[in-house]
Image (cartoon, grey):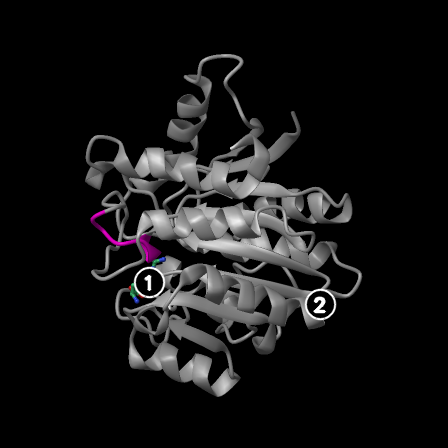
Amino acid sequence: MAILQTLGVTSCVGGAVPFCGSAAEMLRDEFARQIPGQNRLKLQWHMLHPENKGSKDEKLARLNQSISQFTEYWTKENQTFLLVGGDHSCAMGTWGGVINGLRQPGQFGLIWLDAHMDAHTFATSPSGNIHGMPIAALLGRADEKLAAMYPSSDIIKPENLVLIGVRSYESEEYGLLKQAGVDIVFVDEIKGLAQVLIKAIDKLSLSCQIIGISIDLDVLDPEDAPGVETPAQGGIKAEELLAALSLINRHPKICGLEICEFNPEKDTRNKTLHLMKAIIEAFFVAPDKQ
Ligand SMILES: NC(=[NH2+])NCCC[C@H](N)C(=O)O
């Protein structure tokens, strides 16, 4: 059984409430509870904790720097990885690191499954929460304060980014993405998620050497994934996401999966926790072993 390098980021420093830091540890325990011999996936866990000193901004700058060292290494080694956040601000570290690991940083593509656009800067954010800003940094549109939390000097080209499942956003972030020319697939435009995902991968494959996938659990309908920090009604059904992920399972260009924003305080009977595990298995376990 292949071993999947997994980085758990136990941080909610960029989020609105202090609960989403426990996803990685809960998920690690959940995988450990499996009956031996029935494991379809073996995760090699590494854990990163935020420091308890310094300002929020300093903590996030250092945390993203540490995250990026892992993903840079795995990218250079051509090793597929899983990253379990934390709030979504860790995306600056995850994908900044992947970009750092590439000889041609312009050839990185990212598919972002999220109810939100996460494309604010400090100047436009209504909440000031940094989990609503990583896309602006990844596109090189950050203000100085946000740029200090992004651990790469290279960025994602707007044409190499696709947002899928969006339904909750502010006009400033929409303006930023529109102006940059980023491809956005709003949730009500999705007829079949698998089709949308395959189309995005096919498009990015033309210009990109590798492609990453970032899943904010709030892309799902709150009925299926109640345990998220910022729920938004009218999301994608869990069944549809799982089916789509098992179709793109192990696509040769995919370098890693990031999954974020689990909030156990809002979960009901571990529904979202179990779903997180199912998402990881749908994505990483070979179809004949599922
Ligand atoms: N990663 C997230 N859950 N982002 C939600 C962001 C919500 C809102 N747009 C804000 O900036 O505050």
The range drawn in magenta is: 218-223
Residue at 64%, 42% in the rendered image: 70
Q: Secondary structure at mark 2?
A: helix
Mark 1 C-beta to ligand 1 under 8 Å: yes
Q: Quadrant of residue 166?
A: bottom left
Question: Looking at the picture, how far across and down is residue 255, in whole percent?
Answer: 65, 50
Kind of residue at disc 2: Gln
Left or right: where 288 falls relative to 58 = right
Mark 2 — residue?
107
Q: Nearer the viewer, residue 130 or 23?
A: 23
Residue 290 place in picture, x, y as percent: 51, 33
Is 20 within the magenta? no
Disc 2 residue lies near ligand 1 with CB under 8 A: no
Q: Residue at x 38, y 69 (%)?
A: 117
- Give the quadrant of ligand 1: bottom left
The residue positioned 23% from the left and 45% from the top of the image is: 226
- Which residue position is annotated with label 1? 115
Residue 26 seen anywhere in this rendered image of the structure: yes
Q: Is residue 177 above or below residue 104?
A: below
The image quarter containing residue 99 is bottom right
